[in-house]
Image (cartoon, rainbow, N blue to C red):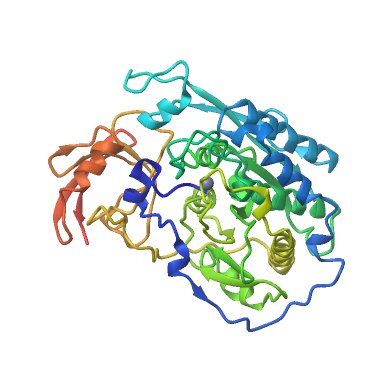
């Protein structure tokens, strides 16, 4: 999962809370969808334990984006897809390659050898999403994703202050990858009530750097995005405690609202939160106006530290989570394309800023200004009329050179202030009235 301190930019721009369990409400279980033994996703033959043991082993050196360890992890995931007889889902076989140039000084530092902090140049980082397709001949496709990169030996998003050490990321996010692969194996057998959708499985790279892999996919989709039914994201599902599973994005579809409360499973107490925006890859799909769900077993003291290890994984909990997600897939299988709805964001604002615009930055954009990848409903940016794709060039009398200048600019405003913003929309400069609140 993306660290809340990612350049402090994320926190400032979209006010991502580190612990978003604070704003979630527990919904009572009002119905019951009994699971038959054949519909249980945990009947999957996939070996979750050995998957996590491999991905989180020191041999993969923490799966840093663009590193050899991450490449090995990607090759392992391809092998699993092939054993399940799934089709390639990427632009070139099972891979969707992309690259980015780190902009953040800390990211430049992380690239290491060929770049130096403050030298003003950075090496391009090449990496890849890993994707497979399960064709059921259906009109719609469900995207099931989990990021497979982590922090390597620790990077700007590490919370570790000790000696340089491998960050194995067993929970973040070997657990989510294992969960996705278990679901893929189960779905590949075409069980009942799953065949009204095709499935696209995506192991995202570059999540920890700023949702780069999912962002790249949504801008370079390998299937028609209009045929995507909904997206399920598993990020940090390895530490089920007291049966509590956070299910974020429960307000992003009318069918989630009506169906999710009916799904009951012994050993899982879903804790719903409505917002489709959070510190992981589902956010990229929410901004395509698609229903999303993010499954999460909660924060812990090993988050983004070398101690996020296999010995602390709750394997029974992962099995139950797989079952629960399988139950959701079967519950909505006969409902056609789900109806998207926007959600109000209930998260608190970032502590260091009195105001925000409530906009999501495009981290892949390297030109002048701040390109917007989305706006949050009911927040000042959206209310002022800002749109996805706009490039913010000016706020008040401050020229917005980049994300850092934007953050400085924000610090100059208080609640209730009114100002003018200039955005570039398809080459046209448009002035908008912003009211901070
Ligand atoms: Zn993370």
> From where the camera sits, is residue 36 visible?
yes
Residue at x 63%, y 84% (from the top left corner): 30
Marks counted in the figure total: 0
Q: Is 339 displayed left or right of 372 in the figure? A: right
User: Horizontal and vertical percent for residue 316?
Assistant: 74, 63
Provide residue 92's location: percent of width, then percent of height: 69, 27
Between 41 and 377, the residue placed more toward the observer is 41
Q: Position of residue 103 (x, y in %)?
A: 38, 29
**Which quarter of the picture shows residue 60?**
top right
Which residue corresponds to the image point at 44% horizontal and 41% vertical from the top-left?
157
Q: Nearer the viewer, residue 196 or 79?
A: 79
Q: Residue furthest bottom?
A: 30
Quarter occupied by the C terminus: bottom left
Please indicate whether residue 119 sits to the left or right of residue 401 in the image.
right
Residue farthest top in this picture: 114
Q: Quadrant of residue 324?
A: bottom right
Q: Residue at x 62, y 59 (%)?
A: 239
Q: Is residue 356 above or below residue 116?
A: below
In the picture provided, is 267 more to the left or to the right than 365? right
Q: Position of residue 382 (x, y in %)?
A: 32, 55
Q: Is residue 27 above or below residue 118?
A: below
Q: Residue at x 79, y 40 (%)?
A: 80
Residue extending farthest front: 163
Position of 356 relative to 215 (above/below): below
In which quadrant of the rendered view does residue 129 lie? Answer: top right
Q: Is residue 117 above or below residue 27?
A: above
Specify whether residue 342 is in view: no
């Amino acid at each position: 999962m993306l660290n809340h301190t990612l350049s402090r930019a994320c926190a400032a721009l979209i006010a991502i809370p580190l612990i978003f369990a604070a704003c979630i409400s527990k919904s009572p279980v009002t119905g019951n969808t009994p699971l038959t033994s054949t519909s249980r996703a945990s009947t999957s033959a996939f070996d979750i334990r050995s998957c996590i043991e491999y991905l989180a082993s020191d041999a993969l050196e923490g799966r840093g984006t663009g590193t050899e360890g991450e490449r090995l992890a990607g090759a392992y995931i391809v092998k699993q897809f092939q054993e399940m007889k799934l089709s390639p889902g990427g632009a070139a076989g099972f891979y969707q390659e992309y690259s980015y140039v780190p902009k953040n000084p800390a990211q430049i530092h992380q690239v290491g050898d060929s770049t130096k902090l403050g030298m003003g140049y950075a090496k391009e980082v090449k990496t890849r999403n890993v994707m497979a397709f399960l064709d059921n001949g259906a009109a719609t496709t469900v995207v099931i994703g989990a990021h497979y990169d982590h922090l390597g030996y620790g990077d700007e998003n590490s919370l570790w202050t000790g000696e340089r050490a491998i960050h194995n990321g067993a929970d973040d996010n070997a657990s989510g990858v294992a969960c996705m692969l278990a679901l893929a194996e189960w779905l590949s057998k075409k069980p009942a009530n799953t065949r009204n959708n095709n499935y696209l499985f995506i192991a995202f790279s570059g999540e920890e750097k700023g949702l780069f892999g999912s962002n790249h996919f949504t801008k370079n989709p390998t299937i028609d995005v209009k045929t995507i039914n909904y997206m399920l994201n598993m990020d940090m599902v390895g530490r089920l405690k007291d049966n509590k599973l956070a299910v974020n994005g429960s307000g992003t579809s009318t069918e989630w609202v009506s169906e999710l409360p009916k799904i009951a499973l012994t050993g899982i107490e879903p804790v719903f939160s409505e917002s489709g925006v959070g510190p992981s890859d589902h956010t990229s799909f929410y901004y395509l106006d698609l229903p999303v769900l993010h499954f999460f077993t909660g924060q812990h003291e090993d988050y983004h530290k070398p101690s996020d290890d296999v010995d602390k994984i709750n394997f029974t909990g992962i099995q139950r989570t797989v079952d629960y997600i399988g139950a959701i897939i079967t519950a909505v299988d006969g409902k056609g394309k789900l109806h998207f709805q926007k959600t109000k964001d209930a998260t608190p604002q970032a502590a260091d800023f009195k105001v925000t615009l409530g906009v999501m930055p495009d981290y892949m954009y390297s030109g002048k200004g701040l390109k917007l990848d989305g706006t949050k409903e009911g927040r000042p940016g959206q209310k002022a009329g800002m749109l996805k794709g706009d490039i913010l060039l000016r706020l008040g009398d401050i020229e917005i050179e980049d994300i850092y200048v934007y953050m400085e600019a924000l610090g100059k405003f208080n609640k209730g202030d009114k100002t003018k913003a200039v955005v570039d929309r398809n080459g046209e400069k448009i002035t908008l009235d912003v009211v901070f609140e």
